[in-house]
Structures are given as structure tokens and as C-alpha cells.
Amino acid sequence: MTIHHPSTPEIAAYLRPPAGTHPPLDSPAYKSTGLRAPSQAPVVLRHRLTEITGPLLTGEIGPNDHDLTRQHAAPPIGERIIVSGRVLDSDGRGIPQTLVEVWQANACGRYAHSVDTYDAPLDPNFSGGGRVVTDSAGTYSFTTIKPGPYPWGNHHNAWRPSHIHFSVFGRSFTQRLVTQMYFPGDPLFPYDPIYNSVPDEKARQRMISSFDMENSVSDWALAYRFDIVLRGREQTPFEEPHE
Amino acid sequence: MSELALTPSQTVGPYLSLGLTWPTGYLVVPEDAPGAITITGVVRDGTGAVVPDGMVETWQADAEGRFDHADDPRGASGSGFHGFGRSSTDAEGRYRIVTVKPGALGDGQAPHIDVSVFARGLLDRVVSRIYFPDEVEANAADPLLSSLPPERAATLVAEQVGPAELRWDVRLRGEGETVFLAV
Ligand SMILES: [Fe+3]
């Protein structure tokens, strides 16, 4: 069958991620993958209009969405920190006006979530959810408290290293990313199957924020820096074959 | 040109609703918008058990097959149509999106919606597509659908269950496993 599309636009696809960057869905050390990871290999989809476009969300941002320490009557317990960085593509271009969503446990490692049964105190002054929009250079910044490590049922004496969950959109469906930001020097790294699900060691280390003395605020908060790099585009556009 | 190395993906974990739930996220268009349709379905795991802690996101063109996005080489539509839907799964594993049927893009693909599914136990999102059951001819000519064995292609086509309601289930693994896409 011949399909002719005189108006077919030229599209530069997004680069495919190098092997070892993203975790294999089937990662047996993380037990929940066993029932949820697809058994069949994904079908490679050529990037067309739907994949090179994507939601350009700035969301409905509340006044204290960027400051998780000011969402309640009193400040939460914990080590106040400023987390900032840039959302970039792999060409080094900042991605402006894109939504960054975060969520995390409190300073004791407890989530303000009905499913979390860890026997650690809830903090009535901490919900643990935030959202910010990057500026024209792709920079974001939010204030929070350092989350604690927490146990989980994956295996005997399993503990997650302290982490903040991040969700970013970029500019295209193809760039969508959910990840976790870790803290430098965490002794739990060697024991965590989720952190270690990323095969390439250098890639794994890119999830670790860096201590950021420069952005620390005297008598107020220490700071950490976390840049998020999303896929860039191929250099040359292609045209759909017309048959 | 220096190329920066990518940030890896990690699971959303079981507490995604603390950060990713929007009360109106499931509304790509208002419920009473002209041409509004509901797409609903259940996400299941390898044993057929429902996934009550997942999230489904959708991305699509508007009813005319246009995107309000500057990277569309045809030009941004300027319509303000945001094209994005997000629904957590409930205790029964069910998600629900209210949207309009996307138009054809004019590139030989049948009308479709791109989907991401996130959940505890998924270290990266899984990506799929929803196609429409009333597009028999266009679906037959679609480059993706026509490249798949019929029983696999069928996992990507929604079922009409009401005048303005479609059903599209996700089977993450096992019998009737949904076709997932590497994008
Ligand atoms: Fe977590």
C-alpha cells in the first residue's frame, strides 16, 4: 500500500539513551519489578510529531509550593536545605519554564502518606510535596528539610538512602523523566537495589547531588546542587519514507 | 559540541501521590466540553492483580490533529489546547481521563494518544499508545499497528463501551501483555 504525504514535515528525533543509563525494568534485586516489569522487549517507535512535542506545563503553582518548610503553621523539624540546579538537555541548553515536581519523606524518614507504616513520627508541619517552574535559564530552586533514610520491605534490613523524588517534563514527550536525588556520601548506597539498578556506575553517580557551600545561606540553610540532564535532539532531521 | 550525560530514571515509588496528584489532572478538557470523551481502564500486573498505586499520563494532539507547541514543524496551533492528562490509579487499579479524540496528524499515522505508566516496581516509565476502534482503515495503515502481529496490535486499540466512553486496559506483564514502546 502506498501512502503519500506531501505535507510530511521534517523531524529531528531525540537521541536514544546510551546503554547503562536507565535501569532495566526487570531488576530482580528490586523485588516489585518481578510482577510489574513487562516480559516482552519494547517495540522501538520512531519519533514523530507526538513524540517530539510534549506538555508545556507551568502548572497551578501555589505561593509556598517552592518552600516545603512554609506549608504549615510552624516550620517542620529537620535540617533546612536549599536544593537548586538546572534542567538541561544533553546539548547543555537550559530548559526554561518547565515544571519540576518533588516529593519526599520527613526528617525521620516517614512519608505523610496513608500507606507508609514505618514506626517513625509524622511531622504535622511537613507534607513533603513541592513544585517549581524553571526560569529562563532552566534553573530551579526550592527549600525543604533533608529527608531521613527509611526501611522498606524489599529484603531483610533494607533501608533506602535519603532521597528526594523528582519529576520533570522537558519540552517533549520523549524527555519525560522521573528520578530520585541522593545526598553525597550516603553509607547506604552499596546496599540499595533501586540506586544500584542503574547499570553504569558513572550514570548512578549523576543522581547524587553535590554539597553547595556557595548557595548556602548564613544562619539559615545549607545547600545542595542537582542538575537534571534530559535527552537532546539528533542533528539532522529526517523525512518519512513515502511508501 | 560537548554532550552532557543523561540523568538516569528511578521508580516513582509508592508515595507518588504526595507530589504528582492534581485534583483536575484527569481533565484534558472540561467534562462538558464539546466532543468530550472519557477513557478509562484498569492497570494490572503479571498475576492479573490490579495496580492501585500507579499513575497514567496521556499526551495527544487536539481534535484537528495539531499541537500547541513550537517544536511542531507545522507551527504551534496557538489554540491553548494543553493535550496532557494525568490520573492516579485508584484502589481498583482504575485510571480515568476526560479528553477529546485527537485528529489525524496527516503523516500516515492513525489518531492516537501517547501514554506513560508509572508505578512502584517500574524503574522507568513504560510507554504505550491508545488507538481508536472506529478508525479501522487508518489503523490498518498505521505504521506501528501494521508492524505488529494482530493480537499484539489489539492491545493498543481501545474498546467503545458507551456513546462517549472508551476502555483501554494496561497489562504490565503476562497474558495479554500490552505492547510497550521504546521512545
Ligand atoms: Fe522514596
Image: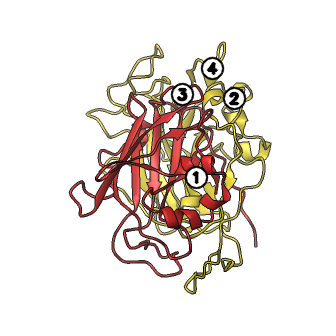
Chain colours: A yellow, B red
Q: What residue appears at the point 51 percent right and 25 percent down from the top-left corner? A: B49
Q: Is label 2 in contact with label 4 (beta carbons under 8 Å)?
A: yes
Residue of label 3? B48
Residue designated by label 4: A154
Q: In front here: A68 or A199?
A: A199
Mark 2 vs mark 3: in front: 3
Tell which tag, 3 or 4, sits nearer the viewer: 3
Q: Residue furthest bottom?
A: A6
| Quarter location, residue A1 | bottom right
Chain letter, disc 3 residue:
B
Instruction: Tell me the distance, in whole angstroms, between the alpha carbons under discs 1 and 4.
Output: 38 Å
Q: Residues within 10 Å of mark 2 (few under 14, many from 20)?
A: some
The residue lying toward the viewer, choosing from A11 and A110, is: A11
Query: Which residue matches tag 2?
Result: A193
Please, which chain is the residue tagged with disc 4 on? A
* Label 2 SS: loop
Mark 3 → mark 1, Cα distance in angstroms: 51 Å
Q: Is residue A220 visible?
A: no
Q: Viewer-nearest of labels 1 and 2?
A: 2
Chain letter behind tag 1: A
| Residue B136 position in % (x across, y down) | 49, 62
> In the image, what residue type sits under mark 4?
Asn
Does A56 sit above or below residue B58?
A: below
